[in-house]
Image (cartoon, rainbow, N blue to C red):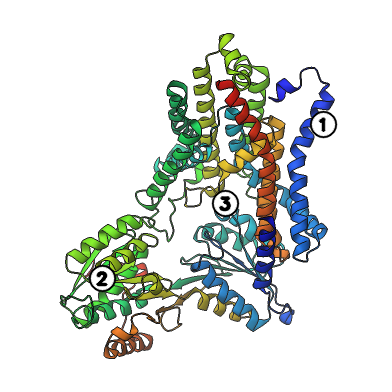
Amino acid sequence: MLKSTAIACGLAILGMGMPTMANAADVAPAALIIAQGGLGDGSWNDTANAGFQAGLKNTGIEGRPIESKDVAAQGEEIMRRAADGGFGLVISLEWIHGEPMEKLAVDYPDANWVIMNQTRKGDNVASVVFGEHEGSYLAGALAAQVTTDESIKGINGKPVIGVIGGVKAPGIDKFIVGYIQGAKAINPDIEVKVAYSDSFGDPAKGQQMAKAMFDEGADIVYQVAGGTGIGIIEAAKAAGAYAIGVDTDQDGMAPGNVLTSMIKRVDVAVEDIINNYADGKFPGGEVMDFGLAQNGVALSDMKHTKDMIPAAYLEKVDALKADIVDGKIEVWDVSTQGYPDFFQ
Amino acid sequence: MAEAASIGRSPLMDWFDKGIGLAFPFIVALVVAAVVLLAIGENPLDVFALMFAESFGTQRRIAATLSAATPLLFTGVATAICFRSGVFNVGVEGALVIGGLCAAFIGFTLPAALGLTLIPLAFGFAALVSAIWLLVPGFLLARYEVDEVVSTLMLNFVAFGITGYLVNGPLLSEISGNNVTPLVHEAAQLPRLMPPSTLHTGFLIGVLVVILYGVWARRTPSGFEAALVGQNKRFSSAVGISIPATIILVMVLSGVISGLGGASHALGQLHRFADGFSPGYGFTGMAVALLGRNNAIGIFLGAVLFGALASAGTTVQLFSDIPLDIVNIIEGTVMIFAVVELGRISLKRWRARR
């Protein structure tokens, strides 16, 4: 037992493979603070760390990911220690670190600070937000095309789709409104059923709610409900219908029953920030929007469903994506614009 | 237990015994960690020196260590108070989480105009609810002999469920991208002792709790009776000590202290309640109590030790390639060898019940 721990530990270190530790033009090292869930979560933390490692490799900057079992309470001490210890760039993946970071940035004006999914003040703080509304628009557009095509297995032909949010809040409605707008762009008469599970960690409730939607004629349900969404995907599998995954590529959770996933590319964001930092162009004081144009959000590769979706539908989605990138289509962003007329 | 052992022996020997009791698991843990470090090609001495520097090297790091130790002062005492009466309460974790949520709730729902009175209100409410929380399994044990290990362990899951639901739903902060409550009012936040460190006044409250526990355990009739119940139930009954009353007393006290610990963490450290509020302070508190042999000074040292491991274990990653796993190995080994004591407790309890 002990031996295997030792071996596992050794492997972990080998696997970490710190890239070339060359002092790239005297740029101070970077720290990436891992959020709750830790490395090995197969999701948010691992994705970000992949981008972190890639960025270090590109630039030759020294850097380390920092894990803690008590990341909520220790965040401030870790970040302060990093700044005291001569780190020039501190990226935190933990949402709850936003508050202390805002204060630390004042104490350490020479260090650069990065926080995710929120905007924080400070000339040396970069806030990373993702264009979830744009990615959700494409998910809605794809779903609206598929839902009326009875030639696809499990589709009933009715123009009805659904979405389940974790909680009624602007951060979640940003996804939902984008999804509805994308669906209506394809079919103005489409009915989009909206429900909230009031929980991000209740798969059983997600399953019941999704089942109810499938029973009412929806055949595709977009999950914006974190862990509750696992139940939504389960329900899609049980009903022979479709779910749409969120945040990471969830297509493999029920191969063939997850139409696509709306992925947040936190790896792209982290790598981009490290590159900018290495070039002396750290975007301090800015809100960095990682939308479709920056490749910060995207639909999954649809490994399991691509072959059953008519190519024309996917081409239409690609065309819409190009229009959003070009600015021809503007997707409503609830987090900055408030609620639109078509969704209150 | 420790009290009984000391009869007829010189205090010096007694202290030596206690010192070994505290140090032995730690020494074994260091040896195990050294073997692992050698196996992965690191120099153990360098790593330990770095860890020591990160725990106690500068004033700031000492403050970080004490800050990490703060919740463990509460959970260590809350656990010890039951263990020394032979009540194997493993529900401190749940009571702490409940207490933390209650304190945060008071801290952000009551009007900010209440000012500093928010703090005693929040602590009082947290202590009250957590006391009731542990009164339930205490009553079940005292009245119906419902096994407290099972009931308190299960109550932890209920606590996680309730707090998880509330922080995901009704108490969720509107501006949040994560499962957190709103921040408590500024007036309800405990002041920091050594800014900019996160060490806060909750540490002093924790130390006070440890001292009061020590006084209660050694200098009061009720503390003596509670220890006697842990040593021999039949004898205790024979001399007129009510076993059920003692069980209920220690469970309620444990709840009160857990609640204070939760309130201290919510108002002093996080300033809110959040998912990941406790990484298992209640369970680490069991190791602290066992390591400290339910003795006040031992609990303080044990809490500081685990606080040091938690704070140094994280920041060494900034300056070396040592993964968090090494710290987990040290912590785990300390716990295993501290738990050697646990065998004595259950044996005693089994004897006492017969």
Asked if disc 3 and disc 2 are in contact, CB closer than 8 Å, the reply is no
Q: Which element is circle 3 on?
A: helix
Q: Which residue is mark 2?
A: A240
Q: Choose between B259 and B175: the one closer to the eye.
A: B259
Quadrant location of the N terminus of chain A in the rendered image: bottom right
Q: Quadrant of residue A2?
A: bottom right
Pointer 2 local density, CA inside 10 Å: few below 14, some 14–19, many at least 20: some
Disc 3 from disc 1: Cα separation: 35 Å
Q: Is residue B43 visible?
A: yes
Q: Which residue is mark 1?
A: B16
- Residue beneath the point at 54% across and 59% down: A97
Pointer 3 local density, CA inside 10 Å: few below 14, some 14–19, many at least 20: many
Q: Which element is circle 2 on?
A: loop
Locate residue B194, reporting x and y percent: 67, 46
Locate residue A4, reporting x and y percent: 66, 60
Which dot, 1 or 2, sits closer to the camera?
Answer: 2
Which dot, 3 or 1, sits closer to the camera?
Answer: 1
- Residue beneath the point at 47% across and 41% down: B156
Which dot, 3 or 2, sits closer to the camera?
Answer: 2
What chain letter is assigned to the residue under label 3?
A: A
Pointer 1 local density, CA inside 10 Å: few below 14, some 14–19, many at least 20: few
Disc 3 from disc 2: Cα separation: 44 Å
Left or right: A308 with respect to B270?
A: left
